[in-house]
Image (spheres, rainbow, N blue to C red):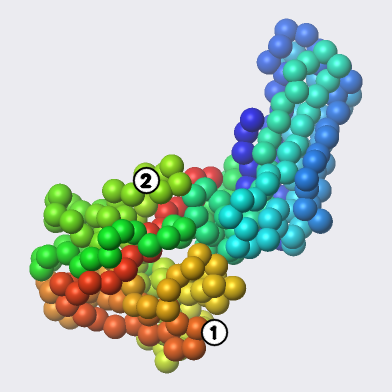
Amino acid sequence: MSQLALAASGQARTLTVTNTGAHTALDLALNATGLPAGTSPISTCGATLAAGASCAVTVTPGATATATPGNAAPTSAVLEVEGSNTNSVNAALQVITFGSWYQGGWVFDVDDTTVVSGSVGGKVAATSDATPAGDWGPASLTGAGSLTDGASNTNQIVTALGATPSAAGRCQASAAGGFSDWYLPALCELGYTFGGGACGTSAAPLLAGNMQSRLKENGDIGGIADSWYWSSTEAAVSPITSAHLHRFDPTLTQQAIVNKSNVYPVRCARALTP
């Protein structure tokens, strides 16, 4: 069974059906179960499909997600193409939005610009904090200065610090949800500040897809504590000893620079596989 994820109210995406047999497929039919309201599939497959030929099923997503944001056990919809003389082919389909559970975590960023023959991209936050809470890492210049690219920051930190335990290293070593590509988010992936700053404000964040806006303020999805969290962004001022923190708070979100030796929690992230 293949997988297809679409963004709620996003662009239509297409599945290709190919007859790999030696004979014409007869009496083809498209069946759909569990589709959320507003999502509709349209098939270009006729009643028959010649051997070696292909046809397409285009799915247009509605505004309703497959499962309510915050539901940690979503059930996929299923599309099935079958014929009277063929095996059936199936695709598990999910319509996702901010706060949906998908690919091991909670969706806080959606990239609907990926090729329409595949799933959406985006980012998810892990379901819980990495353990144990700890320091950012030993004093060192790692070059991890990006405000927006936590994956790149994490690679630079781990390269610079080697096997030395670090906040970024705890994410990179994680196998949460069966995935091995977790990273420590950059400062603006975590959020913004109410007073404005490098990551913008609530009304105009530098990254629209951030954990503060899409999870914390969207029903407190993911159970992120009202606490300071490490980012992977090294401070431009005193980068050898200091790094950036983000405080998740429903009324006064803040960001600060502190010594790397302080102990704070970490919430890892990963990029979706389209």
Amino acid type for the residue under numbered disc 1: Ala
Position above or below: 213 against 15:
below
Q: Report how many numbered discs are placed on residues in the image.
A: 2
User: Residue 38: in sight, yes or no?
Assistant: yes
Residue occupying image coordinates x 38% and y 62%: 129
Q: Is residue 81 left or right of residue 67?
A: right
Q: Is residue 237 left or right of residue 188?
A: left
Residue occupying image coordinates x 78% and y 48%: 35
Residue at which label 2 appears: 175
Horizontal and vertical percent for residue 217?
A: 55, 77
Horizontal and vertical percent for residue 254?
A: 38, 85
Q: Is residue 274 left or right of residue 180?
A: right
Q: Secondary structure at mark 1?
A: loop
Q: Secondary structure at mark 2?
A: loop
Q: List the single residue furthest toward the front.
A: 132
Horizontal and vertical percent for residue 272?
A: 49, 50
Q: What whole-number distance in Å separates the C-alpha atoms at marks 2 and 1?
A: 35 Å
Looking at marks 2 and 1 on the same chain, the residue that comes earlier in the sequence is marked by 2
Residue occupying image coordinates x 86% and y 16%: 84
Horizontal and vertical percent for residue 187?
A: 35, 72
Where, by quadrant of the figure, is residue 168 drawn? bottom left
Look at discs 2 and 1 and give the one toward the viewer: 2
Residue occupying image coordinates x 61% and y 51%: 73
Residue at which label 1 appears: 203
Residue 110 shows which numbered tag?
A: none
Question: Foreground residue, 130 or 214?
Answer: 130
Question: Foreground residue, 44 or 215?
Answer: 215
